[in-house]
Amino acid sequence: MKKGYFITLEGPDGGGKSTQIELTTRFLQEKGYDVVCTREPGGTLSAEKIRAIVLDPDTPIYSLTETLLYLAARAEHIQGLIAPALEQGKVVICDRYSDSTLVYQGLVRGLGLEKVKALNDLVVDGLTPDLTILLDAEPNRLLLRRDTRGVTDRFENEGLAFQEKVRDGFVTLAKLEPERIKVVDALQGQAEVQEVIQKLVLELFK
Ligand code: TMP
């Protein structure tokens, strides 16, 4: 039986998830919470191995295979880390989870939301986040912000049209589940974003 809290962060690449996860973890640890910080795909030895395959640009895979690999990694992650930590009453903060699969594989890669949702439901078996923070921003504005920092990575390689579809996908999901998915403007300063996240998390713990 789940006793802890399950919080996920989602959004397009380059929205500052990692920094916000670090800051949120520190904030909660200072308040005395036992926090487990993890990511998808990944989080356990086997899931990290799947991550290496699925994110390798030199290993082309079909969209269905890609979806199944993300879900296989999730199955390992849930059983090996997330569910046990929640049972022990910990706060689990996860960088991406089901919503990423629904957006990237379901809506952007074109397998279809319903089909991917059905597959994902089998894997997660009801383990839905208590709170999902969507770090949202227009991709072209994120890109400008990254350009000024001289960062070049997959974000730029995938192209703006791809990132716009990703953004639209997340916004669509947030509208479907406004109670769980809270949209936070990622273009605010780091401290402002963190302040909003802290309020949402404390609200959840009330
Ligand atoms: P990240 O660790 O930089 O967020 O990268 C993970 C990448 O994997 C990101 O581009 C989104 C993608 N992804 C999916 O396509 N489907 C998924 O289910 C998950 C968890 C991630």
Image (spheres, helix red, strand yellow):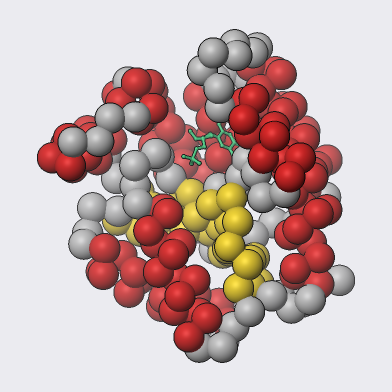
Q: Is residue 29 left or right of residue 6?
A: left
Query: Could you tell me how many numbered marks the image carries?
Result: 0
Quadrant in the picture for the C terminus: bottom right
Q: Position of residue 97 (x, y in %)?
A: 61, 47
Q: Position of residue 188 (x, y in %)?
A: 22, 59
Q: Nearer the viewer, residue 121 or 191?
A: 191
Q: Is residue 23 left or right of residue 97?
A: left
Can residue 126 be seen?
Answer: no
Position of residue 84 relative to residue 136, above or below, is below
Q: Is residue 44 left or right of residue 204?
A: right
Q: Residue at x 71, y 19 (%)?
A: 65
Q: Residue at x 42, y 54 (%)?
A: 18
Q: Position of residue 36 (x, y in %)?
A: 63, 67
Q: Nearer the viewer, residue 123 or 28?
A: 28
Position of residue 169 relative to residue 94, above or below, is above
Which quadrant of the view contains residue 143? top left
Quadrant in the picture for the N terminus: bottom right
Q: Position of residue 174 (x, y in %)?
A: 48, 50
